Image (cartoon, rainbow, N blue to C red):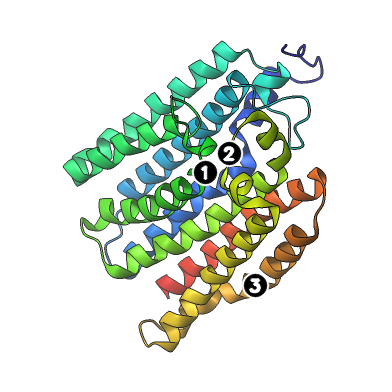
Amino acid sequence: MIEKHSENTSITAAWMLATRPRTLPAAVAPVLVGTALAIADKQFALLPAAAAMTVALLLQIGVNLANDYFDYVKGIDTQDRLGPPRVTQSGLIPPGQVKTGIVVAIVLSTIPGLYLASVGGWPVILIGLFCFAAALAYSGGPFPLASHGLGDLFVFIFFGLVAVCGTYYVQALQLTPMVWLMGAIQGLLITAILVVNNIRDIQTDRHSGKRTLAVIIGERGARIEYLLLLATAYAIPFILWLGGFSSSRVILPVFSLPLAIYLTRLVWKSAGGPQFNEALASTAKLVLVYSLLLSIGLIL
């Protein structure tokens, strides 16, 4: 049963909550890195870069709304949930309105998307269609990716490789090995956000039958995954520098390492929802800080 609306929560505040603003760095960061690569290669184009950012944000919001809606419909979100309230399950926004919100976010994303298609041609159209399908298939459909241990792979591919490579491509109309590698780094970092979320929800997900990768490999395995994701993301720039593939400026993200170490310890030792909520929000901040530092290093 849906809980009654809270009289203290305005409809605007409810929709803001539904968009999950703390997750939006996952949309912003890869576009920043893709644009920094374009600037470094003297291929920067303002309008395509801005359009790519708009598409990324709208699709992220669409995915968040879809996750909220479908997890309620499938009975995954309950009153036992440890994370921040979900607007559908808590009754802040009726399910039908959340469903409409999903459609609106996706339709709005097609406006800048059509412009990008006119710039980049059929590869951009193909990527766009895959993005739309994946946004809905993540939580919905007959085989929701997030419920079958494929959420981590989805995030790595679409929020890492596709986001960075797509942003660069609509400006340069080509791809380089460095672009793919930077996309992989973003994928590793943003997947770490999902891992924290899935560790926090492991008990309720297991009870509802949602088999995230954290449920499949267990809490200890997911904590190790988090450690490996961050460690690899920090190792790649050093390998590029030491191997002579890039200047020393590419290791600027090392200045965010203290936060990464703190978060790794927090995730490893946390035993309750509030601590994982802090780790989730701070991991999103880490992604943004790392990406800003990396972007500066690439441009310099």
Number of callouts in the render? 3
Q: Position of residue 283 (x, y in %)?
A: 65, 55
10 Å crowding of disc 3: few (<14), some (14-19), many (20+): some
Q: Amino acid at mark 1?
A: Gly
Q: Which mark is residue 257?
A: 3
First along the sequence among labels 1 and 2: 1
Q: Position of residue 239 (x, y in %)?
A: 45, 81
Residue ID at (66%, 29%): 208
* Residue 39 seen in render: no
Q: Amino acid at mark 2?
A: Arg
Q: Amino acid at mark 3?
A: Leu
Q: Nearer the viewer, mark 1 or mark 3?
A: 1
Q: CA distance from mark 1 to mark 2?
A: 6 Å
Residue ID at (17%, 41%): 122
Q: Nearer the viewer, residue 238 or 168?
A: 238
| 44 on left or right of 219 | left
Q: Which residue is mark 1?
A: 149
Q: Which mark is residue 166?
A: none
Q: CA distance from mark 1 to mark 3?
A: 29 Å
Mark 3 lies on a secondary structure that is helix
Q: Which residue is mark 2?
A: 211
Q: Is residue 243 above or below residue 89?
A: below
